[in-house]
Image: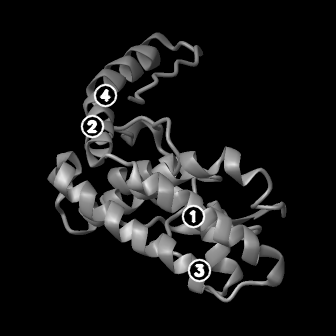
Amino acid sequence: MESGRFVGAQITGMPDDSIVGHLYRQAGRIVEPQYTSGTFLGVDSSAVSLPFANFYNEDWIWLCLENQGHNVEQTYCVEQLHYNPFLNWKERVFFQEEGEILWEGVYEAVSKFCTNNLSSAAFWTDVIEQRRSRIKSLISLILPERTRNVAVEIQQTLLNYLDKLNSEHFSNTMNTYLRSADDWRRLYRKVKRNGSSTHTQVDIRI
């Protein structure tokens, strides 16, 4: 790790994206913002201050907070094998959508140097509305015929999901995550000091 705290890789082959992200990609568009993938990432563990969380987009969220919103140098290429991104989408789409909302909120807060907003339910209400606009736009995408019908179904499913969301869930999730950092750092220092190889997972989901 001579070049910094983190070194990333460009993901070639199958893009590292969500179900909604792949719909946009099939229409020739990319959902912004994009960030360095955690699929292949070099990390200086001595400089890490936050744990990985147990939600979708945990790599982007973690790296954005650790690196104050600055993207990471990508010095390698890693090929991801192709797969059907819409296979069994109903089993994955809600978990992904929660993480997409968290990511968009974290990126906005960090980019504007307003991370205090992450604990504000009003802030997350705005983020959810922005996400709703993105999901509504799915119907206007020019998609291949093979995915047009699934896009309509995904859109309706997610709009129903968004209608039921409580913005306090997201402010509470981020508060719990950020508060867990102190306990995690103490645990990390203890494990490092003792030279333990034990793998410890702390679940911070609400």
Q: Quadrant of the rendered structure where residue 9 is?
A: bottom right
The kind of residue on which mark 2 rests is Asn
Question: Residue 136, image x and y in percent?
Answer: 49, 75
Q: Secondary structure at mark 1?
A: helix
* Residue picked out by circle 4: 180
Alpha carbon distance from label 3 to label 2: 32 Å
Q: Earlier in the sequence, mark 2 or mark 4?
A: 2
Q: Nearer the viewer, mark 4 or mark 3?
A: 3
* Residue picked out by circle 2: 172
Alpha carbon distance from label 1 to label 2: 27 Å
Alpha carbon distance from label 1 to label 3: 10 Å
* Residue 136 against residue 19 in the figure, above or below: below
Q: Quadrant of the rendered structure where residue 155 is?
A: bottom right
Q: Is residue 129 visible?
A: yes
* Residue picked out by circle 3: 139
* Residue picked out by circle 1: 156
Q: Earlier in the sequence, mark 4 or mark 1?
A: 1
The kind of residue on which mark 4 rests is Ser
Q: Is residue 1 visible?
A: no
Q: Is residue 88 left or right of residue 166?
A: right
- Dot 2 surroundings within 10 Å: few (below 14), some, or many (20 or more)? some
